[in-house]
């Protein structure tokens, strides 16, 4: 929310305010997810040793450069925010593979269906939703598309086991 900017003439990109590196930087926070995910996947595997575990990533929320003012996030901030999401997805994928789980990528199939896409094309709602969804959350079309992606991943793994 801190990256929303309704006054571009006095804009201060939020990316400039957040430390990239260091103990409290985004990179450190994202990397801190890795051991937590490893433990979580391990606990699931312990409790359900016969289960196939799927780790589902995050979607594409904003395209490179954004679409200001339709989504009131400055272009460089849109690129920065989506870059953070891409980094989180990378950690999710790495931990899934390292733990024997399957990673399901939603970022790639949702590209072009982000909050900047036209109504009827978008899977992620924007700052002011045009369908029954929270801002920056999947709408019904997005949920259908994401369920199709997850279902296809489950079916593919099932075929691979045969």
Image (cartoon, rainbow, N blue to C red):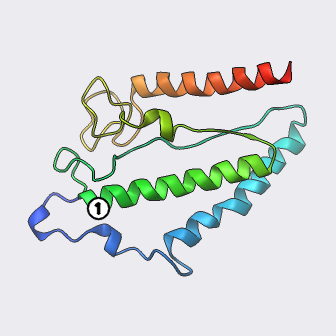
Image side of residue 96 versus residue 121, left or right: right
The quadrant where residue 35 appears = bottom right
Q: Position of residue 98 (x, y in %)?
A: 78, 52
Q: Quadrant of the N terminus?
A: bottom left
Image side of residue 28 versus residue 71, left or right: right
The quadrant where residue 83 appears = bottom left
Q: Position of residue 85 (x, y in %)?
A: 48, 53
* Mark 1, secondary structure of its residue: helix
For mark 1, what is the residue?
Answer: 76
Say few, some or many: other residues with alpha carbon within 10 Å of mark 1 (under 14 / 14 to 19 / 20 or more).
some
Q: Of residues 77 and 49, which is closer to you in this image?
A: 77
Residue at 27%, 40% in the rendered image: 116
Residue at 49%, 38% in the rendered image: 108
**Can residue 11 be seen at all in this image of the molecule?**
yes
Image side of residue 56 versus residue 106, left or right: right
Q: Position of residue 153 (x, y in %)?
A: 66, 27
Q: Of residues 33 and 20, which is closer to you in this image?
A: 20
Residue at 52%, 77% in the rendered image: 24
Q: Position of residue 84 (x, y in %)?
A: 47, 59
**Can residue 1 be seen at all in this image of the molecule?**
no
Q: Is residue 64 above or below residue 3?
A: above
The quadrant where residue 88 appears = bottom right
Q: Is residue 10 above or below residue 119?
A: below
């Amino acid at each position: 929310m801190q990256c929303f900017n309704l006054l571009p003439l006095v804009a201060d990109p939020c990316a400039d305010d957040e430390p990239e590196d260091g103990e409290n930087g985004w990179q450190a926070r994202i990397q801190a997810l890795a051991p937590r995910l490893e433990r979580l996947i391990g606990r699931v595997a312990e409790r359900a040793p016969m289960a196939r575990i799927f780790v589902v990533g995050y979607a594409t929320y904003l395209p490179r450069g954004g679409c200001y003012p339709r989504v009131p996030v400055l272009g460089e901030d849109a690129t920065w925010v989506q870059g953070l999401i891409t980094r989180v997805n990378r950690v999710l994928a790495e931990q899934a593979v390292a733990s024997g789980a399957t990673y399901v990528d939603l970022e790639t199939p949702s590209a072009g269906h982000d909050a900047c896409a036209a109504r009827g094309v978008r899977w992620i709602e924007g700052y002011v939703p045009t369908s029954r969804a929270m801002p920056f959350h999947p709408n019904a079309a997005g949920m259908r598309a994401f369920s199709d992606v997850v279902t296809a991943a489950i079916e593919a793994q099932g075929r691979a086991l045969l």
